[in-house]
Image (cartoon, rainbow, N blue to C red):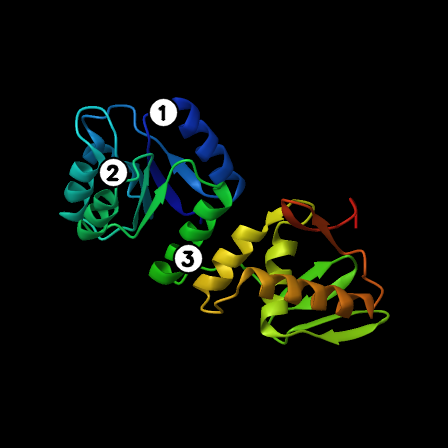
C-alpha cells in the first residue's frame, strides 16, 4: 500500500515538480484545490504525511498546522522561502516535524520524508534483505555481496551506502542525500568519511570483478551501474 502525502503548495509549477518527484518514489500525492477548505481535503485524504508551505492564500501555513494538530498527530514538514529563525521556531512549537527552506535539493526532502516515516510508522524502503545487482546477490542482513567469483564482507556503513545506491541504480544519488540518510541513521558520517567508505566499497567490489559497478559523477554524486536487461 502506497503512503499518502498531502502537499499544500499554491505554486502550481513547484507543486507539479514536487509531486512528480515524489511519485517517482512511489508515494501517492494529493494537492489542494480550494485553499479555504484545507481541513476538508485533509479529512478526505487522511494522509500519512503533510508537506505545507508557510505563505498560502487566505490563511498561512501556521494556521493550518494548528488546525491539523487539533485533530491529528500526522507528521508535518514545512517548506518556506522565508529564512527568519522565528519561522522555524514557530513551526516546531506548533508541532511540525521538520522545516526545509526553499530553494532546496529534492534529495534532502526525500531523505527527511523517509526519516520521518521510518520513525513514525516504522516504514522501510527496503522490501527484502536480498537484492540482485550486476548478477551478484547483495545480502543486506549479513552485509555480504557474492557472485560466481567469490564473496566479500562489507561494513555496516558500506552495505548501507550500497543499498541506497542500488535502490536507485542507473540514477545519480547525491552525496548530500547519502550523508543525510547516514546521519539520520545515527552513523554521523562526514563528507570525508563518505569518500573513504565509497573508496573501500569499490576496492572490495573489485575483488569479485565488480570494479565498474559504482561510478562517480563529479559535482553530483554516485551511480550504481546496472546494464539494461541484466
Kindly identify the residue that appears in the image at 42 percent across and 57 percent down: 115
* Above or below for 110 versus 150: above
> Which mark lies nearer to you, 3 or 2?
3
Q: From this viewpoint, is residue 125 visible?
A: no
Dot placed on the residue nearer the N-terminal end, 3 or 2: 2
| Apparent side of residue 198 relative to residue 91 in the rendered image (left or right) | right
Q: Earlier in the sequence, mark 3 or mark 1?
A: 1
- Mark 3, Cα crowd under 10 Å, few <14 / some 14-19 / many 20+, is some
Q: Position of residue 112 (x, y in %)?
A: 41, 52
Which residue is identified by label 3?
115
Q: 126 or 16: nearer the eye?
A: 16
Q: Identify the residue position indicated by label 1 in the image.
A: 11
Q: Give how far apart the Cα atoms at labels 3 and 2 are.
A: 22 Å
For mark 1, give the secondary structure: loop
Please report whichever mark, 1 or 2, sits nearer to the chain's N-terminal start.
1
Position of residue 177 relative to residue 4, above or below, is below
- Percent x, y of residue 43: 22, 39
Residue that label 2 marks:
42
Q: Nearer the viewer, mark 1 or mark 2?
A: 1
- Residue in the picture at 39% in, 23% down: 12
Kindly report the distance in space between the C-alpha atoms of the residues bearing marks 3 and 1.
Answer: 26 Å
Contact between marks 1 and 2 (CB within 8 A): the answer is no
Amino acid at each position: 500500500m502506497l503512503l499518502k502525502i498531502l502537499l499544500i503548495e499554491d505554486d502550481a509549477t513547484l507543486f507539479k515538480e514536487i509531486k512528480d518527484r515524489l511519485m517517482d518514489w512511489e508515494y501517492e500525492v494529493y494537492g489542494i484545490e480550494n485553499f479555504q477548505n484545507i481541513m476538508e481535503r485533509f479529512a478526505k485524504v487522511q494522509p500519512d504525511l503533510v508537506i505545507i508551505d508557510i505563505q498560502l492564500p487566505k490563511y498561512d501555513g501556521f494556521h493550518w498546522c494548528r488546525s491539523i494538530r487539533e485533530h491529528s498527530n500526522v507528521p508535518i514538514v514545512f517548506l518556506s522561502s522565508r529564512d527568519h529563525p522565528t519561522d522555524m521556531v514557530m513551526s516546531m512549537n506548533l508541532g511540525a516535524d521538520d522545516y526545509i527552506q526553499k530553494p532546496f535539493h529534492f534529495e534532502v526532502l526525500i531523505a527527511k520524508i523517509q526519516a520521518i516515516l521510518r520513525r513514525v510508522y516504522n516504514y522501510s524502503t527496503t522490501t527484502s534483505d536480498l537484492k540482485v545487482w550486476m548478477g551478484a546477490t547483495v545480502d543486506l542482513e549479513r552485509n555480504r555481496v557474492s557472485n560466481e567469483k567469490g564473496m566479500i564482507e562489507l561494513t555496516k556503513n558500506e552495505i548501507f551506502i550500497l543499498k541506497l545506491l542500488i535502490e536507485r541504480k542507473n540514477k545519480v544519488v547525491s552525496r548530500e542525500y547519502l550523508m543525510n540518510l547516514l546521519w539520520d541513521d545515527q552513523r554521523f558520517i562526514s563528507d570525508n568519511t563518505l569518500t573513504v567508505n565509497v573508496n573501500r566499497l569499490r576496492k572490495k567490489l573489485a575483488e569479485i570483478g565488480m570494479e565498474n559497478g559504482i561510478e562517480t559523477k563529479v559535482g553530483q554524486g554516485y551511480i550504481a551501474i546496472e546494464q539494461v536487461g541484466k
